[in-house]
Amino acid sequence: MKVLLVNGSPNKNGCTYTALSVIKQTLNEEGIGADIFHIGKKPVGGCIACYQCSKKGKCVFDDVVNEFTAMARDYDGFIFGSPVYYSGMNGNLKSFLDRAFFSSGSQDPDPFMYKPAAAIASARRAGTTSTLDQINKFFMIREMPVVSSRYWNMVHGSSPEQVMQDEEGLQIMRVLARNMAWMLKLREAGDKAGVPMPKQEEKLYTNFIR
């Protein structure tokens, strides 16, 4: 079993990476593999609603998004990390998630459905809870169990060194990692015991204006 940790910050080794590194170390201690995927500094264009992904099975813009969704099917869980920009996730990560989750919806097997996921946020001071709320909504629309910790999944600091001084924040990251490992082991035990996946219904789409 392995978890893909997505660093949505433009800074490869900054505060978000520091928090993800603590999670990675704890996952490894729990016998779970973990890799960190950095979306990079290049601008990530947003979804243009061309719907070509429903025909091609991937986004028409062949960039870091398609690289990620191709990898995603080989992972059992996900954690997405973002710095706080104006009380929300940063723009590159928002565009990345919009396209990754939308373009992969037609893939078979679905790379995200039923796989546990979590969001973490890094901030100097505030805006973390609204950032977490934004990211968590992606999981909910793909039937992904949302993994929690003992407080909201956030760390504080203006530098990696300051993040490492946030003792409560680091503990939250460790607890989150252990809860993710526990959930993955439960999933594995359920599969071995023959517990069936939830019954799927055909999707219904109801417009408010008819």
Image (spheres, helix red, strand yellow):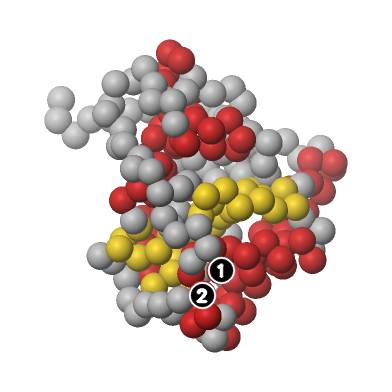
Quick one: 28 or 118, which is closer to the camera? 28
Gap in Å between the C-alphas at discs 1 and 2? 6 Å
x%, y% of residue 38? 52, 50
Say which amino acid is labelled 2: Pro
Q: Residue at x 15, y 25 (%)?
A: 210
Image mark for residue 18: 1
On screen, residue 192 above or below 52: below
In the displayed structure image, the side of residue 49 where residue 33 appears, left or right: right
Crowding around mark 1 (Cα neighbors within 10 Å: few <14, some 14 to 19, many 20+) is many
Q: Name the element at disc 1.
A: helix
User: Which residue does the image show at 75% across and 52% down from the upper left?
Assistant: 33
Looking at the rendered structure, the number of numbered marks drawn on it comes to 2
The numbered mark at residue 68 is none
Give how far across and how far down residue 100 sits, in percent: 45, 36
Q: Is residue 113 visible?
A: no
- Across and down, in percent, residue 209 comes to 14, 30
Badge 2 element: helix
The residue positioned farthest toward the left in the image shown: 209
Of marks 1 and 2, which one's residue comes earlier in the chain?
Answer: 1
Q: Nearer the viewer, residue 60 or 31?
A: 60
Residue appearing at x 82%, y 58% in the figure: 31
- The dot on residue 160 is 2
Crowding near the residue tagged with mark 2, few <14, some 14–19, many ≥20 C-alpha atoms within 10 Å: some
Instruction: Say if 20 sits above or below 172 in the image.
Output: above
Along the horizontal axis of the image, is 83 left or right of 33? left
**Location of residue 134 (image quadrant):** bottom left
Give percent across and percent down for residue 135.
Answer: 41, 54
What is the residue that sits farthest to the right in this orientation? Answer: 192
60, 120: nearer the viewer: 60
Q: Is residue 30 left or right of residue 48?
A: right
Label 1 close to label 2 by CB (< 8 Å): yes
